[in-house]
């Protein structure tokens, strides 16, 4: 994935929590946009225990939003197409 995909996800208005799914099977929950810093080549996530997780975009498989929120959004014009 390109780093711009992560940047776009945290800049969405209104922000919707999502997960970054990595190639090794881990899923990193992003509940607030301020916990992610996106640079030119990498992203850094500050986790709940204040540790930092460096993310290489090549290892990102997908960005996943909650399906229940996506279903709700389709009915009121806020869904993704």
Image (cartoon, rainbow, N blue to C red):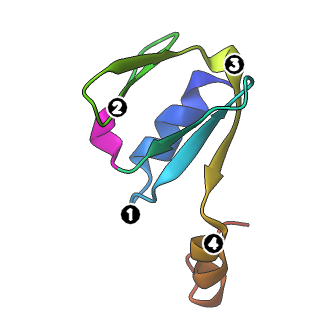
Q: Are the residues tagged 1 and 3 within 8 Å (C-beta)?
A: no
Up-down: is 41 above or below 69?
Answer: above
Spot the residue most to the top.
41
Which marked residue is nearer to the observer: mark 4 or mark 1?
A: 4
* Residue position marked by numbered label 3 in the rendering: 59
Residue at image x 38%, y 63%?
A: 14
Mark sitting earlier along the chain (3/2): 2
Task: Tell me the tag on residue 14.
Answer: 1
Residue at image x 35%, y 18%?
A: 52
Magenta region: 32-36
Q: Residues within 10 Å of mark 3 (few under 14, many from 20)?
A: few
Q: Are the residues tagged 4 and 1 within 8 Å (C-beta)?
A: no
Q: Residues within 10 Å of mark 1 (few under 14, many from 20)?
A: few
Q: Secondary structure at mark 4?
A: helix
Q: Is residue 5 left or right of residue 13?
A: right
Q: Quadrant of residue 3?
A: top right
User: Residue 62's x, y, as percent?
Assistant: 71, 38
Which marked residue is nearer to the observer: mark 3 or mark 2?
A: 2
Q: Secondary structure at mark 1?
A: loop
Query: Magenta includes 33?
Result: yes
* Residue position marked by numbered label 2 in the rendering: 47
Mark sitting earlier along the chain (2/4): 2
Q: Is residue 77 left or right of residue 13?
A: right
Front position in the image: 39 or 65: 65
Mark sitting earlier along the chain (4/3): 3
Q: Is residue 26 left or right of residue 47?
A: right
User: Residue 42's x, y, as percent?
Assistant: 50, 13
* Residue position marked by numbered label 4 in the rendering: 70
Residue at image x 66%, y 68%?
A: 67
């Amino acid at each position: 994935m390109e780093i711009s995909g992560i940047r776009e996800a945290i800049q969405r208005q209104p922000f919707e929590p999502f997960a970054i799914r990595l190639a090794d099977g881990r899923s990193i929950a992003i509940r607030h946009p301020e916990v992610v810093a996106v640079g030119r080549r990498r992203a850094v996530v500050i986790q709940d225990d204040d540790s930092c997780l460096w993310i290489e975009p090549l290892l990102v498989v997908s960005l996943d939003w909650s399906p229940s929120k996506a279903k709700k959004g389709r009915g009121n014009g806020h869904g993704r197409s």
